[in-house]
Amino acid sequence: MTEHEHVRVAVIGSGFGGLGAAVRLRREGVTDFVVLERADSVGGTWRDNSYPGCACDVPSHLYSFSFAPNPDWPRTFSGQEHIRAYLEHVTDVFRLRSHLRFNSEVKMMTWDAERLRWVVETSSGTLTADVVVSATGPLSDPKTPDVPGIDTFPGKVFHSARWDHDYDLRGKRVAMVGTGASAIQIVPSIQPDVAKLTLFQRTPPWVMPRVDRPITGAERWLHRQLPFTSQARRGLLWGLRELQVQAFTKRPNELGLVEQLAKRNMARAIKDPELRAKLTPSYRIGCKRILLSSTYYPALAQPNVDVVASGLGEVRGSTVVAADGTEAEVDAIVFGTGFHVTDMPIADRVVGAEGKTLAEAWGSGMKSLRGATAAGFPNWMTIIGPNTGLGNSSMILMIESQLNYMADYLRQLDVLGGRAALDARPGAVDAWNHRVQERMKRTVWNTGGCTSWYLDDNGVNTTIWPGTTTEFRGATRRVDLAEYDLLRPPPEPEAAPKRRTKKRVEAGA
Ligand SMILES: Cc1cc2nc3c(=O)[nH]c(=O)nc-3n(C[C@H](O)[C@H](O)[C@H](O)COP(=O)(O)OP(=O)(O)OC[C@H]3O[C@@H](n4cnc5c(N)ncnc54)[C@H](O)[C@@H]3O)c2cc1C
């Protein structure tokens, strides 16, 4: 058998999740690890999304690592280039560069049940790892709809997450497809420059004003000199969002008041009643992600913008045709149509103990134990796995909870000693998912009357966490060994020459 380079941990991805995992591994004293990244720099989401207007929609002081506060955020909602620079800075400060392997796309990882390790095949070679931490991101593989006739389009076509900066949109007739979080940032950024903007809207979003402003020099000075002020700011931002969770998860009707505020936000900018009607959602606010913008509606009110209340149905040469038959001649089509979320591509590339891929194991829907591990995939865990997404707060809070879980998982393996692997018990996975889905029943995401990207093809919400970030922190503080089977390697051939089978014992026993 070919011997490959072996590491204790292989982390996949170098966004907030992968870099956070790397810092945490170092803090736990684990230095024998690599971070495999398909691109040629760190940043994940914030490297790939560079469209005009790209910024976070959770305030920067909360959308950053608790262990790496940044007193110098330039705005309350910082832009993509600043978040990307922050992640580069984290990489340097925590000396992660020596662990990074760029241009290393993971093509396949296969569980070696004999040696209790993962064989990880990448575009830059193969290695083996005791543990794999997959931080490939929930929103990292763009999804573009299969529009009939798109091949006949003579102009430019690209996805918001792969913006073509060489193409000059100035003076062009542009079709923007989609009205999600990216689209509502792109529309006001390009509207003043383009000749015509035709927006294809399948479902209107609820949009609340975004209170974005530069962070003053005095504030930054204060945060630098007295770091607790920055922590207090973060604490306040976090606390306010924790208080909102009850309305999302238990009392969606209370959100009616928020709808009134959102309608007022629209009415301030959109005076045409016909356009207002097109832009008014018919589902409960919060069912889809609430979007924040103070410039989206004013841009839609401009004479060079047409809102088509229908999805893009077909392309005939340079004519784009909506599902409702509306036609427009355009020079470029920009897809703001989201990502492969409930069908994450990495799941096709993980082959577990039974020889099945994770995608096959998840055939009837993504399922994990505590958002991290999956039955039949020993010593494999994911950051931002199933049901760990948030509708209203910072994903970095969830990532850091998952890093606690990862750290305890490795500690448990150390305590168990020798060569060992933990495999989530199917019963524990089912019990966790049953609890999650029971809680989901009352949430606005399930009852709000919308079809969102939070739901999979079966209509099951496998993406959102139906609770507070505090509850998730509690649920991921420790690994409960009773939820795992402990795997040990089979005895050496000399000791047991007749059979080579893996030994499975109850970890909690
Ligand atoms: C435009 C946009 C705005 C957002 N704004 C917010 C916000 O305001 N607040 C919030 O909480 N969340 C926001 N999010 C969600 C955001 O994705 C998460 O907050 C967070 O950045 C995810 O980090 P991650 O490391 O898990 O994934 P990513 O940042 O997506 O990183 C995944 C990395 O894995 C790499 N990778 C993937 N597959 C492979 C492979 N097979 N082999 C090797 N490498 C691979 C990718 O190249 C990438 O670098 C936003 C997302 C988008 C797209």
Image (cartoon, grey):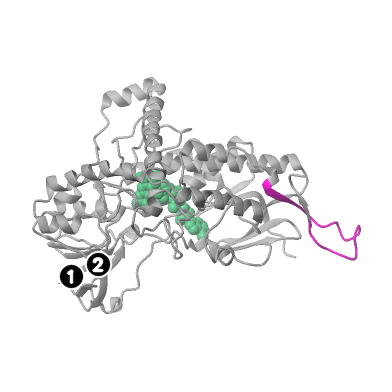
Is label 1 in a helix, a strand or a loop? loop
Classify residue 183 by image quadrant. bottom left
Tag on residue 71? none
Say which quadrant the N terminus sits in.
bottom right
* Residue position for label 1: 330
425 or 196: nearer the eye?
A: 425
Query: Residue placed at 37% from the left, 41% from the top?
Result: 247
Vertical placement of residue 156 versus 34, above or below: below
Is ligand 1 closer than 8 angstroms to the Cβ of mark 1?
A: no
Residue 484 visible (yes or no): yes
Residue 235 screen position, x and y as percent: 40, 29
Residue type pointed to by label 1: Val
The quadrant in which residue 350 appears is bottom right
158, above or below 416, in the image: below
Q: Is residue 507 left or right of residue 400?
A: right
Query: Dots 1 and 2: beta carbons under 8 Å?
Result: yes
Disc 2 CB within 8 Å of nearest ligand 1 atom: no
The residue indicated by pointer 2 is 333
Q: Left or right: 265 with respect to 45?
A: left
Q: Is residue 211 left or right of residue 20?
A: left
Tell whether position 490 is magenta: yes
Front one among 389 and 157: 389
Q: Residues within 10 Å of mark 2 (few under 14, many from 20)?
A: many
Q: Which residues are magenta?
A: 483-503
Residue 413 screen position, x and y as percent: 71, 44
Q: Quadrant of the C terminus?
A: top right
Taking the magenta stretch, the answer to whether it contains residue 43 is: no
Identify the residue at image location x=41%, y=35%: 242
Q: Quadrant of the rendered structure where residue 140 is?
A: bottom left
Residue displayed at 86% across by 57% down: 492
